[in-house]
Image (spheres, rainbow, N blue to C red):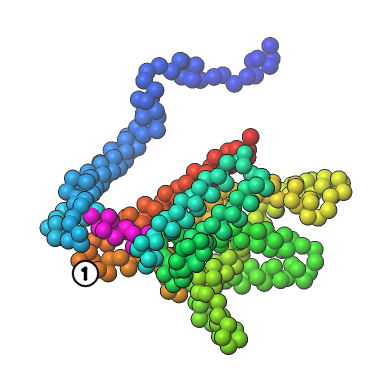
Amino acid sequence: MTAIADMPEVPRAARRPQTGNPALRWLRTNLFSSIPNGILTVVLLAILAKGIFSFVQWGIANAVWLTPANDSSACRAVRGLGACWAIIPEKYRFILFGTYPFDEQWRPALSVLLFIALFYLSTRRALWRRELVLLWVGALALISVLMWGGVLGLSFVSQDRWGGLPVTLILATFGLAFGFPLGILVALGRRSKLPAIRSLSVLYVELIRGVPLVSLLFMASVMFPLFMPSGFNIDKLLRAQIAIILFAGAYLAEVIRGGLQAVPRGQYEAADALGLSYWRKNRLIILPQAIRHVIPPLVNTFIAFFKDTSLVLIIGIFDLLTTAKTAIIDPAWQQFSVEVYIFVASIYFIFCFAMSRYSRSLEATSRT
């Protein structure tokens, strides 16, 4: 009786059964719970409605979708009132593939599809086996054959002609694929008990993180060849790729190190009690838990580096954003850059949003 008497009394409003429309109840609770909240909700909805209406008027109702070949007169007639989406079918091949030979652009298009297929298959946990690694190796070899050519009857295309979306995917994919294991090794090195390894890891991280990516790309493009023997030259795309890998490895190392610190000390002691070696302990017990802890910041870093590939413009590499800027140099279409940037932004958004959604599902799965 005393225990029952000591129990807190449930408010009478909470004991009443909730009736009425669930949607109206949600609106009343979240958007119109008080007079200030109701006023703020109405004002924000009015601003949002105005913005949507203006965009529909500009981007759909008054837009020009198609024009005769390289004729922008119809777009100039509605400039300021409607969008000129006709620039996209006119310039999309240059935006997506740069100066790659026109008749051979099916090769970079197929390479992009192979990249997307690899990304999709890599998200299927049922396929996380050694065969997936072999699939990646084979697909990347096929992509190299498609892009370079020179074999199987394909004409050779130098890297100077590459551009657009394939270059962005190559830089981002290889940068993160090699930067991630490098980051793991550096993170383990920073926690090593050997002073030399720990000092070298700290020096690498602080040195790379202390300078912007632009400076690393500039050093890789301009300064690095000066230290090479006469006649020895590395392609600028490879130099940019190495700079991105080093930069990504330093940032990912700090993210992974945070995950390692979040693993309870008892896990290390249990692994040592089982007699596991250093590498088996980290591979089987420590790293899986550490990476699970830092999935959100890892994906945030992946998204940031995918967008940072646009900085390779400084060394003359035509990525997706650079080809978009170059496409509107044409005087006939120079006035319609907004539409081109919206088109490119939508491509970046699709890839980044896909990574974000997958990270959420992976994080939810790892908690179960």
Image coords of residue 114 (percent x, y): 49, 52
Residue drawn where x is 78% and y is 46% of the image: 267
Q: Does the stretch in magenta take in 43? A: no
Picture quarter containing residue 141?
bottom right
Under circle 1, the secondary element is loop
Q: Is residue 321 visible?
A: no
Q: Does the stretch in magenta take in 88? A: yes
Residue drawn where x is 46% and y is 71% of the image: 158
The boundaries of the magenta stretch are: 86-97
Question: What residue sits right under mark 1 in the picture?
Answer: 331
The answer to whether 98 appears left or right of 175 in the picture is: left
User: Would you say the magenta stretch is mainly helix, strand or loop?
Assistant: helix
Image coords of residue 116 (percent x, y): 48, 50
**Amino acid under disc 1:** Pro
Residue drawn where x is 41% and y is 51% of the image: 349
The answer to whether 71 appears left or right of 27 in the picture is: left
Image coords of residue 88 (percent x, y): 28, 56
- Observer-nearest residue: 168 or 253? 168
Residue drawn where x is 46% and y is 19% of the image: 13
Query: Looking at this rendering, what residue extends furthest in the bottom direction?
Result: 230
